[in-house]
Amino acid sequence: MNKPLPFTSFYTNKDGAVMKNYWASSKDCKACPMKSSCAPNIACRKITRTIYDKQYLRAYSRQQTKRGKQMKKLRQSTVEPVFGSLTQFYGLRKIGVLGKLGAHKVMLMAAIAFNLKKYLKKGGRKPSSGIFEAAIESFQSCQVIFRANILNILNAYRFS
Ligand code: SF4
């Protein structure tokens, strides 16, 4: 109803995300004809938005462009199935190491193993056996479930 809805405070929700609160004035809402549908059970209307609202809106408007739609299609057919496979079938639902550096290492190894698997599946030239031994050795430090799955892949190709 063309009344101001000013920012009043920050708060952190139960997922740890920082949000912004906007409160209308109770004086405005009390006298408003829309009160029963807009703010039926409280004295005045409150709206909550993430602190990244501006960035979300910018990303959303970019996704609606022709180029944005093309890129979404490309991402859905290339990157997202890989993440899906890693989380659903290769034990990467959680990263079992501490710190960004450790997580980065696990993701790099996952990418190497996944690319190697794809390469060999598409009929890529089989590398000399020493490469498999080196790869297996480097995977020994990975988390248990992930390591078991990757080692199975490598062994399957090594002996095929
Ligand atoms: S009740 Fe809703 S529409 Fe009316 S003044 Fe308050 S916020 Fe605005």
Image (cartoon, helix red, strand yellow):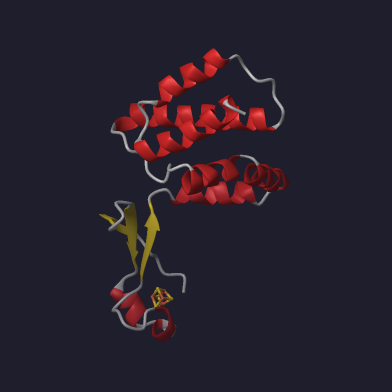
Relative vertical location of residue 69 with respect to residue 105 in this rendering, above or below: below
Relative vertical location of residue 12 with respect to residue 103 in this rendering, above or below: below
The residue depicted at 50 percent of the width and 46 percent of the height is: 89
Q: Nearer the viewer, residue 152 or 32?
A: 152
Relative placement, left or right, of 30 versus 82 is left
Count of numbered labels shown in the rendering = 0
Quadrant occupied by the C terminus = top right
The residue depicted at 71 percent of the width and 45 percent of the height is: 70
**For ligand 1, which image quadrant applies?**
bottom left
Q: Is residue 129 visible?
A: yes
The residue depicted at 69 percent of the width and 20 percent of the height is: 125
Give residue 139's position: percent from left, percent from top.
42, 26
Specify the quadrant of the image occupied by residue 77: top right
Give residue 102's position: percent from left, percent from top.
34, 28
Relative vertical location of residue 53 with respect to residue 75 in this rendering, above or below: below
Specify the quadrant of the image occupied by residue 131: top right
Q: Is residue 55 visible?
A: no
The residue depicted at 43 percent of the width and 43 percent of the height is: 91
Q: Nearer the viewer, residue 124 or 100?
A: 124
Relative placement, left or right, of 36 versus 13 is right
Judged from this view, the residue extending furthest toward the front is: 159
Relative placement, left or right, of 71 versus 14 is right
Give residue 113's position: percent from left, percent from top.
53, 29
